[in-house]
Image: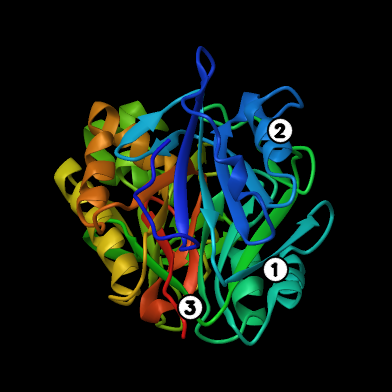
Amino acid sequence: MTATSASPGAFEAHRCLWRSDTGFEAPLPVHLDGDRTLVLAFADADLGGPDGPVAALQRAFPASIVLACSSAGEISEDLVELGTLSGVIMRFRHGALRWARADVAERPVHAVGLELAAALAGDDLKGVFLVSDGLAVNGSELTRGLVEGLPDGVRVAGGLAGDGERFGHTWVAAGGAAQPGVVAAVGMYGDGVEVGVGSAGGWSSFGPGRAVTRSEGNVLYELDGEPAVPLYRAYLGDFAADLPGSALLFPLSVTSDHGDGAVVRTILAIDDEEGSMTFAGDVVAGGVAHLMTSTLDQLSEAAGAAATQAVAGLSPQAGQVAVVAVSCVGRRLAMGQRIDDELAAAQDCLPAGSVQVGFYSYGEIGPGVAGVCCLHNQTMTVMAVSEREVA
């Protein structure tokens, strides 16, 4: 557990890490428990039970807001951990906190987003961090509803819970036991509270654009009036033999038919019989799709760019900085043994004494074109939180 020295009562951020063989690496700072303390934790999907580290955090910080989700890899400083819990304990001096949760079973997720926004909206709301079940929720609609319901200028970040490479079950823990089908968010309030967000992918397009002529939600059926899968296989050439795994190296960039920017979409599954491709987020009919590619160096540089954007949103008067990084499981699998490079690149762009934690997700929530928050895939999203003294 690490923290820089801070003046008495100042904003504090402490990192915590739990491993199955050693437990928490250092005693938890339980003296920080209180209604101005936020605990964010990200853990392997098998660690959400009543005897696991998430429940231990809830018992250790009964008066605090404890928000946790399952992950596809845990971020602790500049390292990726697997089978662990990585978290941060943030104590605000003056800032206030409020949280909300919702079950999404058989409910329109856009309405869930609006509901969460209504619960969190406030004149001095500075930032929202959201986590969601990663398999049962359309993250695009959830994010759209949240953003529509929040006041202008609120910084938003978060991600969809993961389950490693298994894609079997995900969970969120907020105000109780870890459960699937849950969305939860925390709002940060106060004149001195500062929140910055950044997001970058590092991907570049190649080849001609193809019109999305038939899609339903996150399933793409046709490009330029032809089945999508054969076209995609033709683009990949020799890499097509390694599908679906090689799809992580060649996501699609999809623009809308309204000309309001593009998002990168990860391919989760391919149906050769239907000629369809299933993505981790919506693919809007009427948009234009481009094949994307990148290099490992470009992916790392993008992580640094996301961190730079996030801390640029903080003032020089801000105190210690807590950084929550949310990156895509596709990036972790694509980068392989070099995955720590992107975390090191992000950390190198942070102020001295910053604490960086986070997780690998099934979808990243962060700023898109013109700063409008949306669901991304294959990006690194960074939220930086701090607090300055207020006279």
User: What amino acid is labelled 1 in the image?
Assistant: Gly
Residue indicated by mark 2 = 55
Q: Nearer the viewer, mark 2 or mark 3?
A: 3
Q: CA distance from mark 2 to mark 3?
A: 31 Å
Mark 3 is surrounded, within 10 Å at the Cα level, by few (under 14), some (14 to 19) or many (20 or more) other residues, namely: many
Residue located 33% across and 53% down the image: 354
Q: Is residue 360 left or right of residue 174?
A: left
User: For residue 331, what is the image quadrant?
Assistant: top left
Residue 293 visible in rendering: no
**Residue 130 falls in image quadrant:** bottom right
Q: Which mark is residue 113?
A: 1
Residue at 77 percent across and 49 percent down: it is 175
- Give the residue number, with chain letter if any, for mark 3: 192
- Nearer the observer: mark 2 or 1; the answer is 2
Which of the marked residues, 1 or 3, is nearer the chain's N terminus? Answer: 1
Residue 37, compared with residue 192, is above or below; it is above
Q: Earlier in the sequence, mark 2 or mark 3?
A: 2
Report the side of 173 relative to 324 (left or right): right
Could you tell me residue 270's position as x and y percent?
Answer: 50, 39
CB under 8 Å between callouts 1 and 3? no
Q: Secondary structure at mark 2?
A: helix
Compare marks 2 and 1 and give the one earlier in the sequence: 2
Between marks 1 and 3 in the image, the one whose residue lies nearer the viewer: 3
Left/right of residue 243 with respect to residue 179 in the rendered view: left
Q: Residues within 10 Å of mark 2 (few under 14, many from 20)?
A: many
345 or 98: nearer the viewer: 98
The amino acid type of the residue labelled 3 equals Gly
| Mark 2–mark 1 distance (CA, rounded to whole Å) | 26 Å
Residue 254 lies, in percent from the top left, at 40, 65
What crowding class fits label 1: few (fewer than 14 Cα within 10 Å), some (14-19), or many (20 or more)? many
Secondary structure at numbered mark 1: helix
Residue nearest the observer in this picture, 320 or 391: 391
